[in-house]
Image (tube, helix red, strand yellow):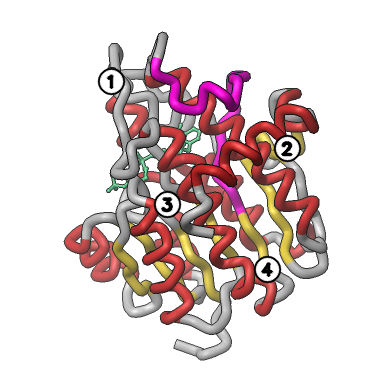
Amino acid sequence: MSTDARKVLITGATSGLGRELALRLAAQGWSVLAHGRDQGRLDDLRREAGAAVRPLVADLASLKDVTKLADLTTAATDRLDVLVNNAGVGFGPPGQRRQSSADGHELRMAVNYLAPVLLTRRLIPLLTASAPARVVNVGSIGQVPFDPADFAFERGYDGTTAYRRSKLALCAFTFDLADELPASAVTVNCLHPASLMPTAMVREARTAPISNLDEGVTATLRLITDPGLAGVTGEYFNGSRPDRALPEAYDPGFRAKLRATTAELLADYI
Ligand SMILES: NC(=O)c1ccc[n+]([C@@H]2O[C@H](COP(=O)([O-])OP(=O)(O)OC[C@H]3O[C@@H](n4cnc5c(N)ncnc54)[C@H](OP(=O)(O)O)[C@@H]3O)[C@@H](O)[C@H]2O)c1
């Protein structure tokens, strides 16, 4: 493989959208750092994709493991062109009870929001050194408002609402980070890849798919590779179409509260 291959880190590369992105980018000559939590399934991916894929193992439900993933990444490469925060926990099966991460946080908020925030912040020096670089956050159109003071979501819990809260938080983070980083160095965007693709999380929720995987893959690949999106930052896309996230994601009051809560929860790690 050429040493000047572009480099991408994809979280959640052992399943669904992330796995297909890894396969397609490897086939296009990218060097793929493929994150998963299961070495055996990463080995399967590597057998299928070839030597362009380098597996990195970490459980994103553990903040310590998230920092390990950042360290593994910086040890594996001195350049990172694109970080794709794709891994996620879905609605869960109907009637899903509240679950906690290794650190005691609500699981969906931990994996879908705290993990990408921590991973991205830890990788900013590498991304900045690789300018122009991109961060692609895989969000969802399914966002709901919440009070950051109720981050723990201990009362009135349901998995679907927890998922949607975490995806609003991910949008808000996207826009905060885009404001912080010069677009000439690192662009930061968020997308809803496609609605109800036939992946593990949709099967687990016992919901009927309405899109195919290819729709989400095409939309996400565009944010990763399209030269026409150079310098485009702080945007939310519904598939390939620029769209608006929930109003709270643009609300300075909501964003400040969420930032303060997040800073407190990640204080030992950032
Ligand atoms: N499917 C849809 O219709 C849809 C719609 C909108 C947005 N999205 C978003 O698209 C992204 C990809 O989802 P998908 O549809 O491809 O679902 P998926 O097949 O269930 O993939 C989810 C990925 O996240 C990983 N993951 C979950 N918990 C983890 C943890 N604790 N540590 C490390 N990795 C973890 C999974 O790992 P394992 O392989 O080990 O389980 C898997 O690779 C998610 O962010 C999702 O919210 C999907």
Tell me what residue is drawn at x 75 percent, y 52 percent.
178
Q: Quadrant of residue 162?
A: top left
- State left or right for residue 232 relative to residue 75: right
The residue under label 1 is 93
Q: How far apart are labels 3 and 1 at the CA level?
A: 21 Å
Query: Does label 3 or label 1 sit earlier along the sequence?
Result: 3
- Tag 1: amino acid: Pro
Q: Which mark is residue 241?
A: 2
* Of pointers 2 and 4, the one earlier in the residue sequence: 4
The disc label shown at residue 133, or none: 4
The local secondary structure at tag 1 comes to: loop
Who comes first in sequence, dot 2 or dot 1?
1
Q: Amino acid at mark 3?
A: Gly
Residue indicated by mark 3: 18
In the rendered view, tell whether residue 256 sits above or below residue 162.
Answer: below
> Closer to the N terminus: mark 4 or mark 1?
1
Label 1, residues with CA under 10 Å away: few <14, some 14-19, many ≥20: some
